[in-house]
Image (cartoon, rainbow, N blue to C red):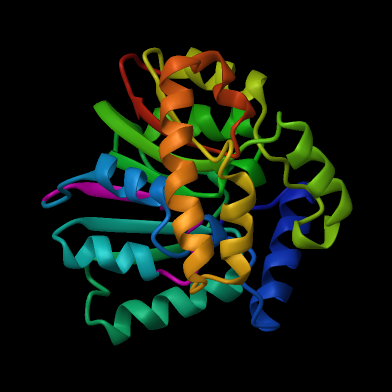
Amino acid sequence: MESKFTERQRKEELYHDAAHKAGVVKRGHLNAGNTSFFKCFCELIGEVTGLTILEIGCGSGWFGTQLAHRGAKVHGIDISGEVIQEALRESEKQDCADKAVFHKMAVEDLTFENNYFDLVVGSAILHHTDIRLAMTNICRVLAPEGKAIFVEPLNENLALKIWRKLTPWRRSPTERALIKDDLKYIQNVFPGAVYYYFGFTSMVSMGLLMYFPENGILIWMNKNLERLDEVISKRYPRLGHYFAVVVMDLKKKMEC
């Protein structure tokens, strides 16, 4: 089920293969720890028993195998052959290889049948893709009334733009955090899309916790700033795209 890659996809593949071999965690950093946005992501996924699920950017398969143990049939895809091999080993180790299957594949070139999945999920992955092709393919493989849940970084905030300019080594050469126009396009594909925003005043504490996850002062600060962010996002929803992270709740309402 492996598909041919474009030049951009090949760059992503080489980057993440090398990162995996070096033992560097590059993708999936947004789901580390007990972050409020990852909790929101998991809550939106909800009960999965009996569902057929596609996980995009499955990495080493840790989340896909969790879903399988919860009663789902999971297909995980990733552009990196290195992490796919690890995911296959993990599913064998956890005795769920019949329920969690992993493929080297790009989301822009999904080979699954139309209307095949009840649910599509992904964490910090869409910004590595051609967003328009990715969303079109996701909609195509979703069953009628199927859902897609994603958590993604945003890049409209000036502080985030400066940070990313100063730290290019933290990212692959072709990735691009989402902007307002991307969110508008996703709403065109999935009318009624609901967005939950995280990381406005808590942007700094969120970043520091990636390096010092056990620091009590940072944990306390982040918890209180997240409460403030929740108030701001509800009172001033138009500021949403200036936050650091968005969780997307998408439901298929039409044929793609």
Tell me the residue at 26%/30% (across/down): 146
Tell me residue 109's x, y (percent).
56, 42
Indicate left or right for 223 with 11 as reference.
left
Depth order, front residue of 26/227: 227
> Where, by quadrant of the figure, is residue 139 drawn?
top left
Tell me residue 71's x, y (percent).
13, 59
Q: Is residue 200 magenta?
A: no
Depth order, front residue of 48/197: 197
Indicate left or right for 44 with 26 as reference.
left
Depth order, front residue of 9/159: 159
Tell me residue 24's x, y (percent).
66, 76
Q: Is residue 56 magenta?
A: yes
> Where, by quadrant of the figure, is residue 234 drawn?
top left
Q: Which region is colored magenta?
A: 50-61
Tell me the residue at 73%/47% (across/down): 175
| Quadrant in the picture for the C terminus | top left
Tell me the residue at 48%/24% (across/down): 232
When the figure is inspected, residue 100 is found, relative to residue 173, above or below; the finding is: below
Indicate left or right for 53 with 152 as reference.
left
Indicate left or right for 175 with 192 as reference.
right
Tell me the residue at 54%/44% (across/down): 107
> Where, by quadrant of the figure, is residue 190 drawn?
top left
User: Does residue 1 show up?
Assistant: no
Tell me residue 26's x, y (percent).
64, 65
When the figure is inspected, residue 63 is found, relative to residue 202, above or below; the finding is: below
